[in-house]
Amino acid sequence: MITFDGVTKRYADGTVAVDGLSLEVPTGEITVFVGPSGCGKTTSLRMVNRMVEPTGGRVLLDGVDVSAVDPPALRRGIGYVIQQAGLFPHRTVAENVATVPRLLGWDRRRARARALELLERVGLETALADRYPFQLSGGQQQRVGVARALAADPPVLLMDEPFSAVDPVVRASLQQELLRLQAELRKTILFVTHDIDEAITLGDRVAVFRTGGRLARLDAPERLLAEPADDFVRGFLGRDRGIRRLSFVPGDTARLRTDLTVPVTADVAAARAVLEGAGTGDGDRDRDAAGEWLVLVDPDGRPLGWVAPRALPDTGTLAEARPEPYGTFVRGRDPLRAVLDAALLSPSGGAVAVDGSGRVEGVVTRRALDAALARAAAGAGAGTAGGAGGAGRADASTGTAGVPGGVDAPGTVAAAGEAAGG
């Protein structure tokens, strides 16, 4: 555990970078410091490994005041990852990763074996071990930086905007890689970023700093989004914080229909029959949600797009149809935010649910999505993985048991109408 006890940093010119900071970074969790430029988040992080010395208060590491520990010895026991990796350009990848083990007296064979092990763990091929940093992409360099920080198996990792210098696609990949590693290693991680989306994706807890180095709010990300402390926090979170909250609601809270799909090998008459069967009885209340659209699937069960049978000729096969764009989400993994995104990409207003291999499991209609969003707004499903960043982590810890939702098999569409409030 890292403890900040009334920590202040004041420079000679009177500038206050950190003002009376008191908080705890729990063992085995990711705590994210976020805030505008100049708010003291990086200064606070650097006081943990004594790269910056406080002018007031104490920083404790597992109850020990870090000011009483020799700085080089302290830093050898703390992993440190910075922007653009900070690799030694004249050393190979393996030599970079083995830096701290070698400083600790490990022999070359053991240090290299550890480096190769960690390269694989962070998702890099061991064939890269003998390359130099300039021969790697930015994302690969950042992975090497993470591997180097883990080399001596430190209990604490300090990460100062480590992913800010890479493109958004690589950044998202690195974030997921960090979450995967954390699920395995359970390090105590203090992570600094200026990006609120990154903060709520990664953080078990998020600390929002004001300009002037004062703590504005410390809480689990879903509670932070639901209940901002004041206008400053509300403004920093942005106007779309309601959408971000959906990242903490499982996508399975939206009821699934399994009777709105049709194989590409079917003919038009068969497609119309499927639609008519799906719209019988109480299911008529859901007809507007389906929009008389069906999901066309290939012989392997993967989606090809939406089709509207009423727009097709009277005869012919669906192989001649021109499917419309569609959006998918992975059922059992993705949050309600992904379901909403998939629905917005679809002309039907519905979202296509697929399994981990990409095969269609069913459809969340617009009415079912509306019902799930209403439940989320009322607080239903807010108990997902307290503090877990992202629905992938929430699903891993809680599953989907007990959440409102379920699957409608063909002929049970009345339940869908009931769930939708029909």
Image (tube, rainbow, N blue to C red):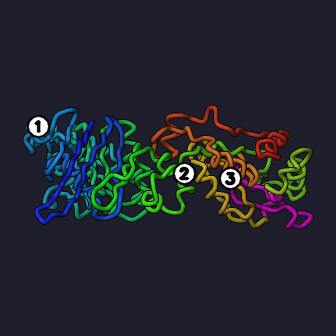
Q: Nearer the viewer, residue 96 or 76?
A: 76
Total number of numbered discs in the rendering: 3
The amino acid at mark 1 is: Trp
Q: Secondary structure at mark 1?
A: loop
Q: Which label's residue is closer to the chain start, 3 or 2?
A: 2
- Mark 2 to mark 1 CA distance (whole Å): 47 Å
Residue at (30% x, 52% y) in the render: 143
Q: Are marks 2 and 1 in contact (CB under 8 Å)?
A: no
Asked if residue 305 lies in the magenta stretch, the reply is yes
In the picture, which quadrant includes the N terminus? top left
State the image coordinates of residue 201 (x, y, percent, origin top left). 44, 50
For marks 3 and 2, give the one nearer the viewer: 2
**Is residue 199 within the magenta segment?**
no
Q: Foreground: 131 or 385? A: 385
Q: Are marks 3 and 2 in contact (CB under 8 Å)?
A: no
State which mark lies toward you, 2 or 1.
Answer: 2
Q: Residues within 10 Å of mark 1 (few under 14, many from 20)?
A: some
Residue 57 position, x and y percent, is 18, 44
In the image, which residues are magenta?
291-320
The residues tagged by marks 3 and 1 sit, at their Cα atoms, a distance apart of: 53 Å
Residue type at mark 2: give it.
Answer: Arg
- Of the two numbered discs 2 and 1 on the same chain, state the one appearing first in sequence: 1
Q: Which label sits on residue 106? A: 1
Look at the picture and state if 208 lies above or below 414: below
In the picture provided, is 42 more to the left or to the right than 72? right
Give the residue drawn at x 8%, y 38%: 105
- Left or right, 203 with reference to 162: right
Element under disc 3 = strand
**Disc 3: which residue:** 352
- Residue at 22% from the left image edge and 42% from the top image edge: 151
Q: Which residue is mark 2?
A: 245
